[in-house]
Amino acid sequence: MKNNNKAIIFTHHNNTDFEIQNSNIIKNYNPNWDFYSIGFEGYNLLPGSLTAYRENYPNNTGLATITTQCPDNPDWYSCDILLCEAYRQIPNYESYFVIEYDTVCNCSIEDFFKLDQDFFGNNVKHNVDEWEWVDRYLSFSNSSKRDFGAIGQSTCIFFKNYALKKFYTEMTDNKHLYHNMLSELRVGTVMKSLNILNKPRPDIEDFISYETWRINPNFNQKYFYHPIKSFDIIDER
């Protein structure tokens, strides 16, 4: 039910105590946002979650076969489809904030991020022509040389409605161009074409990374940290 003009999209693939506790924390810190959990069809999701279907979107099965990361799970390469499905199912919000299940926080979204942009990612990159994921995409026959960009990690991403709508439309109208392209590359390339490929704050790399050892969490400050797989690390501090 739509009560606010802003929606949190909580992406996940499992229903454990961690997802339950973390989703409740995020809800409690952000009562002025409507909260939606979402995951792909076929997973054990939180009760009441939106279910995402893959059929109408680019397929990364080929990409999965030529990499060492999760070769048996193309969904790992395609989390942006969850954003498309969220927009398809709840298209009428002014703003959307995407947060992965393994991102923890101790404050509201507005207390940590400035929401004065039409879009922001995290470790965004505007020049990624030498990135391995670009080379992998270009090795497929459906590929096309583009002005590539990258959004960084697929969490703590903010979209105004028109930006997410543009991404959804591009993925559905031209999906053949985006087969076998990593999700972070797909979002980054489309947002770059709109000239809105931005970061939320200059120190975001201190908080959001690909691996836990790359960040140095300080739980005495306001934070959104990723990836954190257990609350034990917080309880031990």
Image (tube, grey):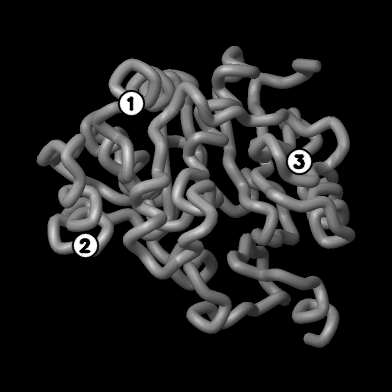
Residue placed under numbered mark 3 in the picture: 30
Q: Amino acid at mark 2?
A: Trp
- Label 2 vs 1, first from the N-terminus: 2
Question: Where is 82 relative to 6, above or below?
Answer: below
Q: Amino acid at mark 3?
A: Asn
**Which one is in front, 101 or 199?**
101
Q: Relative to residue 161, is residue 4 drawn left or right?
A: right
Residue placed under numbered mark 1 in the picture: 175
Q: Relative to residue 45, is residue 144 drawn left or right?
A: left
Spatial separation of the CA atoms under disc 3 and disc 1: 34 Å
Residue placed under numbered mark 2 in the picture: 131
- Label 3 vs 2, first from the N-terminus: 3
Q: Residues within 10 Å of mark 1 (few under 14, many from 20)?
A: some
Q: Is residue 143 something that shows in the picture?
A: yes
Mark 2 or mark 1, which is nearer to you?
A: 1
Point out which mark residue 109 bears: none
Q: Position of residue 212 (x, y in %)?
A: 57, 77
Q: Quadrant of the N terminus?
A: top right
Q: Position of residue 136 (x, y in %)?
A: 23, 56
Q: Amino acid at mark 1?
A: Lys
